[in-house]
Every structure is written in C-alpha cells, then in structure tokens.
Image: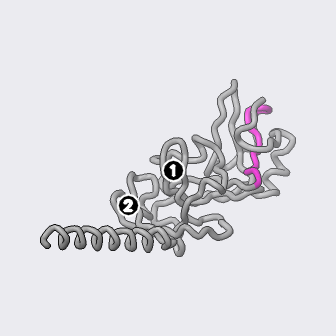
Amino acid sequence: MAHVLAINNSIKALAASVVVLGIYTAQPYRPIVVSGASMAPTYNDWQLIVADRRLPNLQRDDVVVIKTEKGVLLKRVAYVAGDSYLQWNKMGEKWDMVQVVPSKNLAPDCYRVATVPSDHIYVVGDNLTRSSDSRNFGPVPVSDVIAWLPGAPKPGLGAQTVPPLDQSVIAELSPRVRPIADSSATE
C-alpha cells in the first residue's frame, strides 16, 4: 500500500509540474535579471525586470531583449528602418558615429551616411561608454528581438539619447559623404 501511495504522490507531483510549466510557457511575460552596466543608469546590474514576448511595432527609445552571437542582450532602440547615421570609414575600418555632430569639414571618403535596412533596428546601451551594441555588430534583424519592455522609462539621468541624422544635415553633408545601404556594406 505504501508503494502505491508513493507512486500516486509522484504522479501528482509530475502532473502539477507539467501544469505549472504549461502555464509558464503560455504566458507572454518573462522575468529577466539585468547583467552588466550597459543600460545604467536606467537599468542596473542584477535588477529584476519583466519583459513581454508579444512584440509591437518597435519605435525609437523602446527597450528590447535581443539574441546575438554574444548572447542575450538588453538594449534601447536608437534607430529604426530608414533612419540614417554617420559612419567613419578609413583604410577599411568602419565605426558608427553615434552621438557625433558632423563637421562641415569632413574629409572625402572618410565618412558616409549609413541607413538602417528594412526589418532591422539599430540598438545601443543607455551607457554608451560601457555598451557593446549595434556600433560593434551592426543593425539587428527585428526577427532577433525576443521581447520588449512595455512602459520602459526614457533614458535616465546621465543616459544618452541618440537622435538619427536629420535630413537637412544629410543634404548639407552630401557633397562630402557617400550614402550606403547599411553599416555592413563593403567598399
């Protein structure tokens, strides 16, 4: 009788686990623990946040969870498809010039205007000096976004916002810079 009771309790525990797992996987919300300082001061290391797997039409300043070759990252959307930014390109090295005011004295062929391709976003950390982001790995396919933070605060005190290049600035720079399709284009 004791063996039958133990087996029944094991089956009940297994059934309860399956029900709990099913409820958890059906929910759109996921707890996430922030790791690192790239989103400080808005989100701090070891802070617990809740992300939603139901993705909206992503906009600038949304905070997203993305999967990359470096792992799962929490970043802010700086640019969306069609937005332009300046890229430095000299001797084959390319660096995205985020948060840089373009000079009217740009050397020809050293800078170019890059545009975020369709179905991509350009993400950065709120703490630009401590973040590995699109400046390092380029625009991210929207299909790599696995969750977002609804109601995420705007960048906090000390955080940096990153506006796209204004079309008037691009027009003014056009004699000195070349447009390209995206930041991963090659010469």
Mark number for residue 173?
Answer: none
User: Does the segment drawn in magenta span residue 115?
Assistant: yes
Residue at 18%, 73% (x, y): give it: 5
Q: In terms of depth relative to the viewer, which is nearer, 2 or 132?
A: 2
Residue occupying the far top of the picture: 91
Residue at 66%, 56% (x, y): give it: 142
Residue 6 position, x and y percent, is 18, 69
Residue labelled with disc 2: 33
Please report whichever mark, 1 or 2, sits nearer to the chain's N-terminal start: 2
Above/below status of 59 relative to 117: below
Residue 22 position, x and y percent, is 44, 70
User: Does the segment drawn in magenta span residue 148?
Assistant: no
Residue 153 visible? The answer is: no
Mark 2, other Cα within 10 Å: few <14 / some 14–19 / many ≥20: some
Name the kind of residue labelled 1 in the image.
Leu
Name the kind of residue labelled 2 in the image.
Val
Considering the numbered disc 1 on the image, is that residue within a helix, a strand or a loop?
helix
Residue at 82%, 57% (x, y): give it: 168
- Separation of marks 1 and 2 at Cα, in angstroms: 20 Å
Q: In terms of depth relative to the viewer, which is nearer, 97 or 153?
A: 153
Residue labelled with disc 1: 128
Q: In terms of depth relative to the viewer, which is nearer, 11 or 157?
A: 11
Q: Quadrant of the N terminus?
A: bottom left
Residue at 83%, 49% (x, y): give it: 172
Q: Quadrant of the C terminus?
A: top right
Left/right of residue 140 with respect to residue 1 in the rendered view:
right
Span of residues in magenta: 107-118
Q: In terms of depth relative to the viewer, which is nearer, 165 or 42?
A: 42
Left/right of residue 38 with respect to residue 141 in the rendered view:
left
> Answer yes or no: do the residues labelled 1 and 2 have beta carbons within 8 Å?
no
